[in-house]
Image (cartoon, coloured by chain):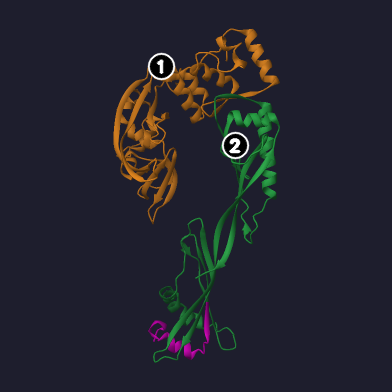
Chain colours: A orange, B green
């Protein structure tokens, strides 16, 4: 819903869209008109375009939940979260920082003179939990619906300095890194799943490959593009998530 | 006596071989299968020689001849043949190897095409669009200069221009003997502000195509 309780404005927008479907570009990312208006409302105090002045006051800015649910495109979500800002985000869903981990990294960059230089930096990963009741989603099962908390890992793209929030499936993260390879946990683990996972496991989990464990020589990361150098006798298998150990030991270069 | 214990030069003579032709192709960081054929002076093939001598030349040829297998996106590979003969003029007879091959190279050629456009399209590109690029087989990508509203009419103008670029780009061919690589057509909008020579209401695109070229190999 673009505006709240303003039937005339809704009608006006519908008429405008019918006559002239538009898209809105924000930070070089294209949004559908409705969502674009609501993101603009987060970014600007006043209407940036004359075309929107009539309806500007009636546009309802997107909330964190709207962004998380309605924006499936990760670049759109990045722009949305960026303009929502951390303060508004915290006010809305009050995420809890579960744990934070950092990795000291070294990579090669080309400086402005075109020279190859070694860059040392600290990569910080943070795991957040959002109270499940903020989402009102449930897991059907015996005893009725169980409202589950949701988790995201916050990380930074080292080359662009952009912050990303990536949803993770904590149960899958736990299974991926379970050293005992124990049978899948059931709902009994849900209440304190955050005690069984960490941020590095979560960021590693966001990378998937069909190369079986032990078959990767090293990994190179450029933004969200991961290159895998395989060992000579690697095996392919089911698509799987990377483990924390692989992420820590095999990631060589990042940009 | 097994074939490995026999002297290959003696076997060569016993079978009346005049020369051997090793056909090969390589590239993509590996050798493809090599095929040896043995011939007498009349040029007739001697099929029984394969079982006697292939094992020897399959190893030895790599000690005597360089094959360039490593592709790098520019150099693709080579194919041809190696002519093997027995040299008996010297005190010690020996096999000599003469490679004759063609190498394959991937070269990209480009040109600048100009597109007269309406004032509306011209302003749209100058005011809102920083870059536009794409290929004949994929969608185009746009980088915008500013936050803006893009109307359906403006999208249509962009699509019409892209269609025209693809059409004229498809007609353009580099003036060379190479073989056009079907999926290699790319285009990119030139930054109007950086152009030295330009005309109002005209947009310029760099169009490039890749060609496979063949040259005599070392």
**Could you say where residue A55 lies in the image, as x and y percent from the top left?**
60, 11
Magenta-highlighted residues: B1-21
* Relative depth, front residue between B207 and B86: B207
Chain letter for the residue marked with disc 2 in the picture: B
Q: Determine the residue positioned at 60% across, 21% down.
A: A33
B9 vs A116: above or below: below
Please tell me in which quadrant of the rendered image residue B40 appears.
bottom right
The quarter in which the C terminus of chain A is drawn is top left
Whether residues under marks 2 and 1 lie with C-beta atoms below 8 angstroms apart, the answer is: no
Disc 2 and disc 1: Cα gap in Å? Answer: 46 Å
**Could you say where residue A116 lies in the image, as x and y percent from the top left?**
36, 46
B36 vs A102: above or below: below
For residue B192, the mark is 2
A63 vs B112: above or below: above
Q: Determine the residue positioned at 39% across, 16% down.
A: A87
Q: Is residue B43 left or right of residue A88?
A: right
For residue A93, the mark is 1
Is residue B5 magenta-colored?
Answer: yes
The quarter in which the N terminus of chain A is drawn is top right
């Amino acid at each position: 819903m673009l505006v709240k309780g303003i039937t005339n404005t809704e009608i006006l927008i519908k008429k405008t869209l019918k006559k002239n479907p538009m898209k809105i570009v924000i930070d070089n990312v294209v949004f559908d008109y409705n969502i674009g208006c609501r993101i603009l409302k987060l970014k600007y105090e006043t209407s940036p375009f004359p075309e929107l002045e009539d309806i500007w006051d009636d546009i309802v800015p997107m909330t964190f939940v709207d962004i998380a649910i309605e924006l499936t495109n990760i670049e759109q979500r990045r722009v949305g979260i960026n303009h929502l800002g951390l303060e508004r985000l915290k006010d809305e869903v009050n995420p809890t920082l579960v744990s934070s981990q950092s990795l000291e990294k070294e990579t090669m960059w080309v400086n402005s003179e075109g020279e190859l230089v070694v860059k040392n930096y600290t990569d910080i990963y943070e795991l957040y939990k959002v109270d499940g009741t903020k989402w009102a989603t449930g897991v059907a099962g015996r005893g009725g619906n169980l409202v589950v908390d949701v988790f995201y890992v916050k990380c930074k793209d080292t080359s662009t300095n952009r912050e990303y929030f990536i949803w993770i499936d904590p149960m899958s993260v736990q299974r991926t890194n379970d050293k005992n390879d124990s049978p899948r946990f059931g709902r009994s683990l849900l209440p304190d799943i955050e005690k069984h996972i960490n941020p590095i496991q979560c960021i590693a989990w966001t990378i998937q490959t069909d190369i079986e464990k032990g078959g990767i020589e090293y990994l190179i990361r450029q933004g969200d593009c991961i290159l895998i150098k395989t060992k000579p006798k690697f095996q392919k298998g089911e698509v799987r998530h990377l483990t924390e150990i692989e992420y820590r030991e095999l990631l060589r270069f990042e940009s | 006596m097994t074939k490995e214990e026999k002297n290959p030069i003696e076997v060569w003579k016993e079978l009346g071989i005049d020369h051997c032709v090793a056909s090969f192709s390589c590239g993509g960081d590996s050798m493809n299968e090599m095929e040896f054929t043995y011939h007498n002076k009349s040029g007739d093939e001697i099929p029984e020689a394969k079982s006697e001598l292939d094992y020897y030349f399959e190893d030895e040829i790599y000690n005597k001849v360089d094959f360039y297998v490593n592709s790098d996106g520019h150099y693709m590979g080579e194919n041809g043949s190696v002519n093997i003969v027995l040299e008996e003029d010297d005190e010690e007879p020996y096999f000599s190897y003469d490679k004759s091959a063609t190498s394959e190279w991937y070269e990209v050629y480009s040109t600048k095409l100009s597109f007269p456009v309406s004032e509306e399209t011209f302003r749209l590109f100058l005011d809102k669009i920083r870059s536009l690029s794409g290929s004949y087989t994929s969608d185009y990508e746009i980088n915008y200069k500013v936050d803006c509203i893009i109307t359906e009419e403006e999208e249509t103008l962009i699509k019409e221009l892209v269609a025209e670029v693809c059409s004229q780009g498809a007609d353009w061919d580099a003036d060379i003997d190479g073989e056009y690589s079907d999926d290699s057509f790319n285009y990119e909008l030139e930054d109007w502000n950086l152009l030295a020579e330009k005309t109002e209401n005209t947009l310029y695109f760099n169009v490039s195509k890749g060609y496979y070229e063949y040259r005599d190999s070392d």
